[in-house]
Amino acid sequence: MSPVDPALSPAITRRLTGVVPANMHLDVHWRPIGTAREAAKLAKRDLSPSLMIAWCISRVMLKHPAFRSTVQADGRIVEQIDFDLGVAVALEGDRLATAAIHQANRLDWPAFVAAYAAAVARTRAGKVEEVQTSLILTSLGAFGIEQAIPIVVPPSMGTLFVGKAHMRMMGDQGVVSPVEVVTLSLTFDHRVVNGVGAAAFMHDVKVQIEGFVLPG
């Protein structure tokens, strides 16, 4: 038998001590993102759904101080004025790294698009940095995964998982019909925010996604 390295490094595992995780799910209509994606393709612009969702999340973080906070090694919770947004990137050998969009709050749409692409490219090339992101966006939609419960790794206070778009029967004013949705799954550190605050954040993310239009 040969020893096998753990999926999570000991350094990450140690950070999990003290986290008080809680999780909630919310279905969000996918049509606005799907429509924007098709419009981008027609315009020959490489704008992924993950990029669009990351933009929506960064706008909502501006309104919710808890979600732009980090948890320090000594347990202190520090609210960031200028915050970074993390994007989980899969590497070879079942490894994960976080691409950091630095000072996401200061970026307009063109700058955000450029920063997102550069951060993901650097990370995929193996240039992994020690990140201080408040929130991490992750997705396994490419593998057909509709729902998952992510973990929280400090200093981040939360991880937001976006599943594969799928059809779900939903009611609207007494009429039930199939709607294409994605399921958002937020795991957050309960030391930083309570359920009501997390639900308010999720609601605002839903509003942003369902109202998304490609910025001019």
Image (tube, rainbow, N blue to C red):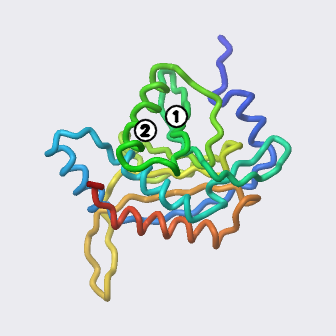
Q: In the rendered image, which quarter contains the N terminus? A: top right
Q: Position of residue 42 (x, y in %)?
A: 14, 45
Q: Position of residue 32 (x, y in %)?
A: 28, 61
Question: Going 27% across and 62% down the picture, which residue do you hit?
Answer: 31
Q: Judging from the image, what secondary structure is the residue with disc 2 in?
A: helix
Q: Mark 2 Cα within 10 Å, few/some/many (few <14, many 20+)?
A: many
Q: In the rendered image, which quarter contains the C terminus? A: bottom left
Report the number of discs: 2
The residue positioned farthest toward the top in the image shown:
2
Of badges 1 and 2, nearer the viewer stands: 2
Q: Amino acid at mark 1?
A: Ala
Q: Position of residue 111 (x, y in %)?
A: 40, 42
- Image height check: is 125 above or below 144? above
- Residue 192 horizontal side relative to residue 48, left or right: right
Q: Residue 95 falls in which quadrant of the image?
A: top right
- Image height check: is 13 above or below 196? above
Residue assigned mark 2: 116
The numbered mark, 1 or 2, whose residue comes first in the sequence reads 1
Q: Judging from the image, what secondary structure is the residue with disc 1 in?
A: strand
The residue positioned farthest toward the bottom in the image shown:
174
Q: Mark 1 Cα within 10 Å, few/some/many (few <14, many 20+)?
A: many
The residue positioned farthest toward the right in the image shown:
74
- Residue 125 horizontal side relative to residue 128, left or right: left
Contact flag, marks 1 and 2 (Cβ < 8 Å):
yes
- Image height check: is 50 above or below 62? above
- Image height check: is 92 above or below 191? above
Question: Going 51% across and 47% down the picture, which residue do you hit?
Answer: 104
Q: 155 or 8, which lies in front? A: 155
For the residues labelled 1 and 2, the Cα–Cα distance comes to: 8 Å
Question: Going 56% across and 71% down the picture, which residue do you hit?
Answer: 200
Residue assigned mark 1: 99
Q: Amino acid at mark 2?
A: Tyr
